[in-house]
Image: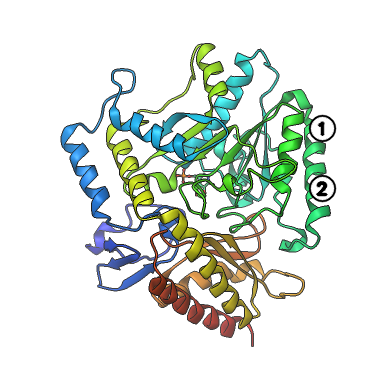
Amino acid sequence: MHQEDRGLLFYQDHLELPTVERAQGIWMWDTAGRRYLDGCSGAVAVAIGHGDPRVLAALERQARKVTFAYRTQFENRPAHQLATRLVTQLSQGLNRVFYTSGGSESVEAALKLARQYHLAKGDVGRFKIISRFPSYHGSTLGALSVTGYAPLNDPFTPLTLPHLYVQAPTGPGGRMLDPESYVAACAAELEGVVQQAGPDTVAAFILEPVGGASTGALVPPPGYLGAITEVCRRHGILIIYDEVMTGIGRTGAFSAYQHWENDEPVGAEVDILALSKGLGAGYIPLGAIVCRSEIADTVVAGGGFAHGHTYAGNPLACAVGNAVLEVVAEDGLVENARVRGAELVAGLKGIQSGNSIVGDVRGLGLLTALEFVADPETMEPFPAELDVHQMMTGLAREQGLLVYPRRSRGGNVGDHILVAPPLSIDGPELAELLDRLGTAVAALQRRLVA
Ligand code: PLP
């Protein structure tokens, strides 16, 4: 790249980054020939690894037939096949599919579908959405309205919907001490927010069943998802699971809600599921919402879903989605995420035991995180100005390892990194990841603790 080509693009910050040249499996190379282990699947998107020839072949095959056909003019086979593939993996009557081209679009669609469902039922007063803090649901205005991450919310508060938040179950100071009474307190908090809003004004509750970037792979305490199900059901509030990051096998189940759906006395229940990242898997922009048939049928009978984007359900994207799901099934990647995920968490705990700055290791399947703290007893975070999450990411990069940094406590303070390699990672590759990560964390420990 010529130096003068730089500077025309702008993103969120001023990082000087290497230029990517190519990628294969869990590895990426820059134009200087340096090799990086993709320890976070890009933005936790590249679910099956880079450059899979089966997906590239499917992409080319479909591109030679037809890349675009608009959904009001044609049906297309890849779109129908993909819908079948998705619903056969899901349960709870989640069997109507609506396509999007990304995660924020899926969240927008889910929120609007919830509103239209209530309208179609004559429940016109229901429009409010409750979400959790911290959380991440996307960057478009609707998805941002339900996101709980202060630096992203604050500039746009005058433009976004009023926030109705409950605390994500992070536990006091980032740790859960007594899960049972804590879950009861979370359910009581949700009940309180519902009562304050007016139960018959609330359309939906949206949550990430396993947290993503904002909480750092937060796994709900036992009983939590059942407890919030019970509150929502009692008040006729739809339950939206944002599985943009957790869907398509990431946590060791095809969809993360499936880990808890059979819990007694009440399990996780889903009305609308939002998917994206792992579906296009970095090969093409693609997303979907999948809802209970009664929701879609009610909205369609009421005149149709008043929503949609140009590229939604195009044959090229859906052909890629089909190929990705075939690879996931053929290579047993959901099972691999479960098995390798357990190894990864064990390895991260090993790193924690040798480094006092690692306050918490959490996650499920291949969605895991390390949280860095000044005091592991109190979980006191490092001063925000140290930017420990970015420091850690730089040190990992020096080891040729990519990780995904964020602030833990709602955006202004706290530091964690996501470790979420492609679901295709094998044993030796995982050992290599842990080795590089261990070296980088030890360097961070030396830098922060005298
Ligand atoms: N929802 C969740 C849980 C996410 O993790 C993300 C992205 O990180 C989004 C929504 C937004 O997805 P996108 O960046 O594709 O718009």
Query: In this rendering, would 55 be left or right of 167?
Result: left
Q: Quadrant of the C terminus?
A: bottom right
User: Label for residue 299?
Assistant: none
Pick whichever, 267 or 417, lies toward us. 267
Q: Which residue is mark 2?
A: 184
Q: Counting residues from the N terminus, which is met first, the one under dot 1 or under dot 2?
A: 2
Outermost left residue:
64
Q: Is residue 267 left or right of residue 337?
A: right
The reply to whether callout 1 and callout 2 are in contact (CB within 8 Å) is no
Residue 88 visible here: yes
Q: Is residue 181 above or below residue 399?
A: above
Looking at the image, which residue is at 43% across and 25% down? 308
Give the residue drawn at x 30%, y 33%.
78
**Residue 252's x, y, as percent?**
51, 55
Q: How is the image coloured?
A: rainbow
Q: Secondary structure at mark 1?
A: helix
For residue 195, side relative to residue 103 (left or right): right
Tell me the amino acid under the disc marked 1.
Answer: Gln
Q: Quadrant of residue 336?
A: bottom left
Could you tell me residue 108's position as x and y percent? Answer: 52, 33
Query: Relative to 302, does residue 427 appear above or below in the rendering?
Result: below
Q: Quadrant of the N terminus?
A: bottom left
At a point 65% along the width and 42% down the height, the residue shown is: 268
Q: Could you tell me how far apart the alpha carbons at marks 1 and 2 are, in whole angstroms?
A: 18 Å
Q: For the residue with label 1, is its CB less than 8 Å from the closest atom of ligand 1?
A: no
Q: Which residue is mark 1?
A: 196
* Nearest the eye: 448 or 292: 292
The yes-or-no answer for disc 2 within 8 Å of ligand 1 is: no
